[in-house]
Amino acid sequence: MLACIYIFCIYGPRYCHNGFVTHFKLFLDKFKLFFLKIGKILSGKPGSFGEGLLQQSRLIRRGGDQCRREQDEEKNCFFHGGNPYLYDVAVSHADKTMKCQFRPDYTSYHVAVYDTITGNLIKGVTHQGYADSTMWARGQAWAIYGYTVVYRETKDPKYLDFAQKVTDVYLERLPEDKVPYWDFSAPGIPDAPRDASAAACTASALYELSTYIPGKNYKETADKIMENLGSPAYRAEVGTNGNFILMHSVGSIPHGAEVDVPLNYADYYFLEGIMRKRDLESNKKLF
């Protein structure tokens, strides 16, 4: 099941992105119903846990049922294939996450732990960030991307307002080159590892967000991020870096995994950002 979910996370959202579907259309047509079935499995039964998505690998039992939701999920929620039940699940998930998985300053917890019986929040914690109280860079990038998608799919202005708030708190704390340290409170700054994957995800989201909120310089900020990611400081020479495009991403420093390495999703969002920049500057609609 876990492998299936990762397939869903990578290819599912692109089902609705006509500009990206060309190479995956046969794959997506064949597995559309499969993706929708996964969505129903993850959503739980009506009335349970606010009808939100259960994080597939984090169901744990410690003196009662607890379930962890990760910030990563938000960007995947609106692959509903026109199914009204799954659409309602996605909206419920977005609302629950907005209420429970963010601090008063709009920085995010990577993980929210819930009681699956009552649906009540138990606590907000980190899994890959520095500490429970800090802003893990990629987690906040997922939130920026995710709530931009939520607004796109719902057109509810409360989500656009929220997307702006989670974006601005991230942008105002960036270093000069706009590529974040792996955690905004990481020890060892300015020598702490950067996370190019968080930067690429944010840049791609900013291109879309700029079309909903003109006048905030989001596109200009995205251009600056992409320019720096495309520089020799982060973009590898052809034939090096395991044939990945970007260097200097971080998977999980607390687990000693994927530290200062290339990551496939860093390259993915970098390429998506390039395509969105191209389309915007050609006066094409992104969606």
Image: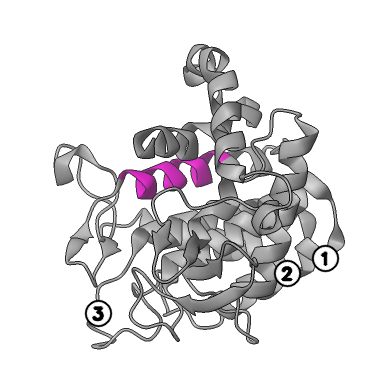
Local crowd at mark 2 within 10 Å, few (<14), some, or many (≥20)? some
Q: Quadrant of the N terminus?
A: top left
Contact? badges 2 and 1 (CB < 8 Å): yes
Q: Secondary structure at mark 1?
A: helix
Q: Determine the CA span between mark 2 and mark 1.
A: 6 Å
Q: Quadrant of residue 210?
A: bottom right
Q: Is residue 91 left or right of residue 126?
A: right
The residue wearing badge 3 is 192
Report x, y in % for residue 62: 39, 69
17 or 257, nearer to the observer: 257
**Type of amino acid under label 2:** Phe
Report x, y in % for residue 262: 24, 51
Q: Secondary structure at mark 3?
A: loop
Q: Earlier in the sequence, mark 2 or mark 3?
A: 2
Mark 3 or 1: in front is 1
Q: Determine the CA span between mark 3 and mark 1.
A: 35 Å
Which region is colored magenta? 264-275
Can residue 24 be seen from the camera position used here?
A: yes
Residue at 58%, 20% (x, y): give it.
32
Q: Quadrant of the C terminus?
A: top right
**Type of amino acid under label 1:** Lys
Residue 158 is labelled as 1
Residue at 57%, 14% (x, y): give it.
29
Q: Secondary structure at mark 2?
A: helix
Chief secondary structure of the magenta portion: helix
Q: Is residue 227 left or right of residue 99?
A: left
**Which color scheme does this rendered protein use?**
one colour
* 218, above or below 38, in the image: below
Residue 162 is labelled as 2
Q: Earlier in the sequence, mark 3 or mark 1?
A: 1
